[in-house]
Image (tube, rainbow, N blue to C red):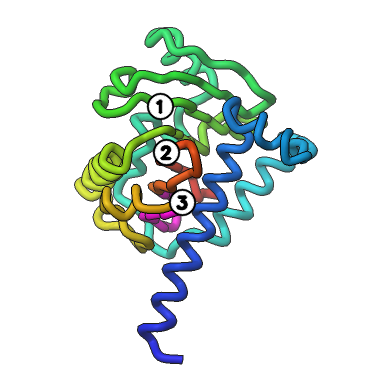
């Protein structure tokens, strides 16, 4: 098998995996749960906080790169430094609606980008993961849904451009992040990934059938 074909297959596989992740995330949102119910599928058994933290550590160890990164941007939040109390204080100051879903997991909804000092579409769901013992911030997920191809492509470009000024170009990219491609068909996906020894990030967009484009930003500490 030639190198060009291997590269195309790798990019395709990466796009499919991201698409499945985004679809899975959508099915467990308030908007997606009715569809999950109609399919006769319930939410998976909830893992314990300790199991969630162990899974995060294992995921980080399996994905991380070999070089440290100069900075670790995460929507303005400081990984491994800010605590649950710090994030709650930010939410109170910015009048953002958040709830403790379980130990080590805080979810905020309908977050104005102005609350993050940014511009662009508001964030439908903003999730924070914390270590159990110290309540240190280690995981940030931001979801925007119902975007047009143009809006998703513009926002994805904006995020990637911002990351480029702080940590450089993506480690890998898959799919086509043009507005035309993203809007052209169901599950059309683009993803930009960053892999460092102490930091993992992904920016991805997927065309969800009947829901428009879903954009996800994921930032995670890869420190042990």
Q: Is residue 28 above or below residue 61?
A: above
Q: Residue at x 38, y 86 (%)?
A: 3
Residue 186: which numbered mark, if any? 3
27 with respect to 158 (left or right): right
Q: What percent of the width, then of the height, locates residue 26? A: 56, 37
Q: Is residue 123 left or right of residue 179?
A: right
Residue 47 shows in the view: no
> Residue 126 placed where, x, y %?
48, 28
Determine the CA span between mark 1 and mark 2. Answer: 15 Å
Magenta segment boundaries in residue numbering? 186-202
What secondary structure is marked by label 2?
Answer: strand
Crowding near the residue tagged with mark 2, few <14, some 14–19, many ≥20 C-alpha atoms within 10 Å: many
User: Given this view, does label 3 or label 1 mark the residue nearer the observer?
Assistant: 3
Q: Which mark is residue 123?
A: 1
Residue 113 position by quadrant? top left
Task: Name the dominant secondary structure of the magenta segment.
Answer: strand
In front of the other: 221 or 146: 146
Q: Residues within 10 Å of mark 1 (few under 14, many from 20)?
A: some
Nearest the camera: 182 or 144? 182
Residue 149: x and y in percent read 31, 43
Task: Give the camera-side residue of 130 and 191.
Answer: 191
Q: Which residue is mark 2?
A: 212
* In this picture, residue 127 sits left or right of residue 205: right
Q: Quick one: 192 or 200, which is closer to the camera?
A: 192
């Amino acid at each position: 098998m030639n190198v060009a074909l291997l590269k195309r297959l790798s990019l395709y596989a990466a796009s499919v995996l991201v698409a499945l992740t985004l679809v899975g995330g959508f099915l467990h949102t308030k908007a997606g749960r009715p569809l999950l119910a109609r399919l006769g599928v319930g939410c998976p058994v909830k893992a314990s906080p300790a199991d969630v933290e162990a899974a995060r550590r294992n995921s980080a160890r399996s994905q991380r790169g070999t070089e440290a990164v100069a900075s670790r941007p995460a929507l303005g939040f400081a990984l491994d430094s800010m605590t649950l109390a710090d994030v709650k204080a930010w939410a109170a100051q910015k009048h953002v609606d958040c709830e403790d879903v379980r130990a080590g997991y805080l979810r905020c909804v309908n977050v104005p980008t102005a609350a993050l000092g940014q511009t662009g579409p508001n964030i439908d769901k903003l999730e924070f993961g914390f270590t159990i013992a110290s309540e240190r911030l280690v995981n940030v997920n931001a979801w925007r849904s119902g975007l047009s191809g143009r809006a998703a492509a513009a926002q994805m470009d904006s995020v990637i451009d911002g990351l480029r000024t702080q940590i450089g170009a993506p480690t890998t990219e898959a799919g086509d992040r043009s507005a035309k491609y993203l809007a052209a068909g169901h599950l059309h996906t683009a993803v930009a990934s960053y892999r460092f020894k102490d930091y993992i990030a992904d920016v991805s967009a997927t065309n969800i059938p009947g829901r428009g484009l879903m954009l996800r930003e994921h930032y995670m500490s890869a420190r042990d």
